[in-house]
Image (tube, rainbow, N blue to C red):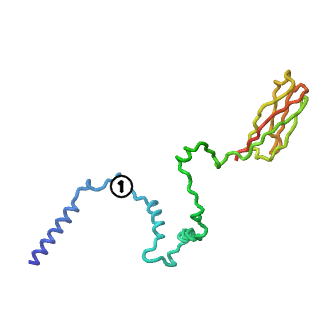
Amino acid sequence: MAGELADALIARIDTLIRSRLNAAISSRLAVSDYVAPDNLGIAAVQTKTDLIPVEGPPGAADYTPARAALLDKLDALISSRLAASDYTTPPTANAIWAAAARTLTSAPSAIASIQYGEIFFTLNSAATLTIAPVVTAKTVLLFLGTTNADTTFNLALARLFLVDSTTVRAGKWNDGGNGTHINFCVVEFT
């Protein structure tokens, strides 16, 4: 009986091997359908999983420089954390929008400084005014207008220049001899 069982098993194995090896070549995966494995992605995952100890608690050999850098972040004193008594619960969005007055108390500013000035000069001349230092590459000079008591010549064109980081120069032709006031604003951006 054992011999018959062995013969039957051998015959079955032979049939399976022959049927598998005799498959048509067209049933195999076409070269154009092959997708190469993501070796870079696999390597990135392996880099992370290599940090995990194989078994048991980590030993000295498990503390690679990468792992040590991560562990250093966990070594903060508990006393350095915010005490629960110092925490202030922020208002909800609904509470802010329901408030009668909303004031923006802090926001990043694109403006480093704003300076207003007025330069006065007489009889076809020019004058300068010293301002607080600014970075000229990040600064604009805004002309805010002129005033002149002599209406006959008040339409003459005024000129305004940022000479350097601390000097504004103004001038105007034909001021009629009564003097001209030129107002300006210097805006320095961050």
Outermost residue toward the top in this view: 152
Q: Please identify the quarter of the rendering in which residue 166 is found.
A: top right
Question: x%, y% of residue 122?
Answer: 90, 31
As displayed, is residue 40 above or below residue 178? below
What residue do we see at 45% from left, 60% from top? Answer: 41
Residue 40 versus residue 51 in the image, above or below: above
Q: Is residue 81 above or below residue 89?
A: below
Left or right placement of residue 42 versus residue 180 in this view? left
Task: Please state if 19 lies on the left or on the right of 76 as rendered.
Answer: left
| Residue that lies at the very extreme toward the left in this rendered image | 1
- The N terminus - image quarter: bottom left
Identity of the residue drawn at 78% across and 36% down? 184
Task: Classify residue 114 as left or right of residue 68.
Answer: right
Along the viewing direction, whichever of 61 and 2 lies nearer the viewer: 61
Q: Residue 87, position in %: x, y?
A: 58, 60
Nearest to the observer: residue 118 or residue 142: 118
- Where is residue 180 drawn, in percent x and y? 86, 30
What crowding class fits label 1: few (fewer than 14 Cα within 10 Å), some (14-19), or many (20 or more)?
Answer: few
Q: How many marks?
A: 1
Location of residue 105 in the rendering, given as x and y in whole percent from the top left corner: 65, 48
Q: Residue placed at 53% from the left, 72% from the top?
A: 64
- The quarter of the picture where residue 186 lies is top right
The image quadrant that residue 3 belongs to is bottom left
Residue at point 82%, 33% (across, down): 182
Circle 1 — which element?
Answer: loop
**Circle 1 is placed at which residue position?**
34
Q: Check disc 1 and give the amino acid type.
A: Tyr
